[in-house]
Every structure is written in C-alpha cells, then in structure tokens.
C-alpha cells in the first residue's frame, strides 16, 4: 500500500478510535497497524496520540499497565458510544454552516458527519431525508469566494498548534510571487475573517514583533520536533497587526437608525444590556460595546440609515471615513 504523507494528529486519532477494540494491544502493535494502513508516522507520535485519547475519552479508552506488556484497549462494550440524536443534529447543522466557509477544513470531520447521519437515520429513519431540507444557512453580507488551502498545510498546522511544536514552511508572498522558505516558524494561532484564514506567529522567537500570513499562500508546512516558545501566547493579544479586534476596552455608544434598518436590533441586540428606544420614524440604541475597527465597519455598512450620536470621537471617525469614500465618486 502506498504511504500517505502528512497525516494530522486528528486524522490519526480518528483512525486509532476505529482500530482499538476490547483486545489489549501494545504501542508497537498499534503503530504497526497504523503503518499497514499507509500512514508514515513514528512510534513516538502514535504513543502521543494514544495518550491523548486516554485523556479525552477516559470512559472509553484505557491504558492497561497492571503487568507487561502494557497496552491500550477500548473498555468492554464501548466501541465509542454513539452521540445522542440532538447532538447529531447539532453536528450536522454546524457542518452545513462550516462547509461553504472552509470546505477543505471540514474534510477531517467526515467520520463524525457519517456517525451523526447514522444516528439521525437510526432514530428518525422515515424523516431523515426530509430533515436535510429543513435547514438552510444564509451568511450575512456580500459573499466572496474562499481561497483554496492545501489540506496537508492545514492538518500539519493544526497538529503544530495542538502539540506546541514549531514548523518549517514554504510561503509565496503576493508581492513577489516567488516561494520563500522559512526554516523555522512559531505559530500562535489562526484567525478566520470572511473567506480568508490567517496564521498569526513569528519567525524570530527573540523579537517582540508578530506577523500574519494568509494561509492559502503556504505551499508547504512541516512539523519540527522543537518546542514552540510562543505556544502559550493568545491570538487575541495580537489582533492589531491584521486589522481584527478582540478589544476588551468598551465604550458607550448611542446610535440612531432609520426604523426599517434598526428593526433587526430588536431581534438581535448588540448585548443583553442594550437599551432600545423606539420612535415614530427611528430607533435609538445605547450600549457598552468594544471599541474596534469591526464596530466602525458595521456602522458604515448601514450607510445613510444610521447616525452616531455619541461618543464624539466615534462620530468624527465615521464622518472622516465617509468623506474619504465620497472623494472616490467626485
């Protein structure tokens, strides 16, 4: 059987759950079973995967060390209990939402999707086909086409983030169009915005500066058996480099909407504490919200149907951005 390269820890974990049964097997035996199925992976990685499964599923996966040879097995009558019907519906609904956003990312979930479909089919056999036509997902705003991301790039990056390891990478910058080789990168995390997925990280562990890279421009990512010194950092600490905001600095805003535009806030308020005053031809809301670029973009998205009443600083920012935009139209 041909070797399958760059299989992620998630893929291997799913395979191991299918391979394990009530018969106790050693790490070496399980490693050989994985190799026989086309995975090119070290015995050490399989040991790490197995120990992770024991942590995640202690009621199902056991590590037996009463007497040698020590080994792993599923607990009796525990070929991974099926999820409940309501959980299966949640999984399938989430998949339907994620699929158009990140279709290549969702491929690793296929076993879960199949299990969820089996649960629904078993419990609601006569209505299952009809159920698939009962839910539709509509994303807000004008939708751009997503960029294709190499699934090996993504799976290896996921594994690096999960295990706290560094990576090497081949990246193609937009400006030059020529591949750049990074012998070592230190990934911090991923940010999904619109139809793009970005990697936040650094190529210099000693420098304070952090960078972002569109994930679709990576041609290759491989794990390095070196610990990532930035693995404990949070993506939220570096939002300013990419224009995203996870700001915890809140400010009080008062916005006046035309009634036909502001009605949506009656159904989906900005927060549980939002105050809404309805008038004959307008709706005025007041709330404490994050001071962020996303807030500005959201307000501008309403065009002439909204006015910032307070604070003055935000009102002036919106005013200046609208003036600059107007210049494009003479």
Image (cartoon, grey):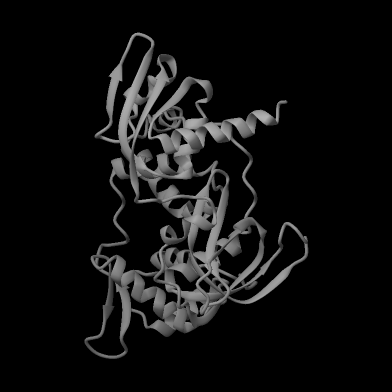
Q: How many numbered circles does the render carry? A: 0
Residue lying farthest top? 280
Who is closer to the viewer here, 240 or 168?
240
The residue at 26%/81% (across/down) is 64
The residue at 47%/31% (across/down) is 299
Where, by quadrant of the figure, is residue 85 drawn?
top left
Residue lying farthest bottom? 68
**Horizontal arrangement in the rendering, residue 221 relative to residue 258 (left or right):** right
Q: Position of residue 237 (x, y in %)?
A: 42, 61
Who is closer to the viewer here, 103 or 217?
217
Q: Is residue 222 visible?
A: yes
User: Quarter holding the N terminus?
Assistant: bottom right
Residue 183 against residue 258 in the figure, above or below: below
Residue 295 against residue 154 in the figure, above or below: above
Q: Position of residue 204 (x, y in %)?
A: 56, 76
Where, by quadrant of the figure, is residue 177 drawn?
bottom right
Q: Is residue 138 visible?
A: no
Q: Position of residue 92 (x, y in %)?
A: 41, 42
User: Quarter holding the C terminus?
Assistant: top right
**Horizontal arrangement in the rendering, residue 95 relative to residue 290 (left or right):** right
Who is closer to the viewer here, 116 or 170?
170
Q: Position of residue 179 (x, y in %)?
A: 74, 67
The residue at 49%/58% (across/down) is 190
């Amino acid at each position: 059987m041909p070797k399958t390269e760059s299989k992620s820890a998630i893929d291997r974990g799913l395979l191991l759950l299918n391979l394990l049964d009530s018969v106790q097997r050693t790490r070496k035996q399980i490693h050989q079973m994985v190799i026989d199925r086309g995975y090119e992976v070290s015995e050490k990685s399989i040991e790490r995967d197995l120990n992770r499964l024991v942590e995640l599923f202690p009621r199902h996966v056991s590590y037996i060390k009463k007497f040698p040879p020590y080994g792993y097995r599923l607990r009796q009558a525990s070929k991974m209990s099926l999820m409940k019907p309501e959980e299966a519906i949640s999984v399938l609904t989430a998949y339907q939402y994620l699929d158009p956003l990140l279709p290549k990312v969702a491929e690793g979930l296929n076993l879960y999707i199949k299990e969820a479909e089996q649960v629904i089919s078993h419990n609601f056999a006569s209505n299952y086909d009809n159920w698939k036509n009962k839910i539709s997902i509509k994303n807000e705003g004008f939708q751009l086409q997503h960029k294709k991301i190499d699934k090996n790039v993504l799976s290896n990056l996921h594994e690096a983030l999960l295990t706290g390891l560094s990576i090497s990478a081949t990246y193609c910058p937009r400006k030059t169009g020529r591949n750049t080789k990074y012998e070592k990168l230190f990934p911090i995390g991923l940010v999904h915005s619109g139809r793009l997925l970005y990697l936040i990280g650094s190529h210099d562990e000693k420098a304070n500066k952090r960078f972002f890279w569109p994930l679709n421009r990576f041609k290759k990512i491989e794990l390095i058996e070196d610990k990532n010194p930035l693995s404990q950092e949070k993506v939220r600490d570096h939002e300013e480099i990419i224009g995203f905001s996870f700001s915890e600095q809140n400010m009080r805003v008062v916005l006046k909407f035309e009634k036909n535009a502001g009605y949506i806030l009656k159904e989906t308020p900005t927060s549980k504490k939002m105050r809404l005053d309805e008038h004959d031809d307008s709706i005025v809301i007041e709330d404490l919200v994050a001071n962020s670029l996303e807030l500005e973009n959201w307000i501008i998205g309403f065009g002439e149907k909204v006015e910032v009443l307070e604070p003055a600083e935000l009102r002036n920012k919106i005013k200046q951005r609208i003036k600059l935009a107007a210049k494009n139209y003479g």
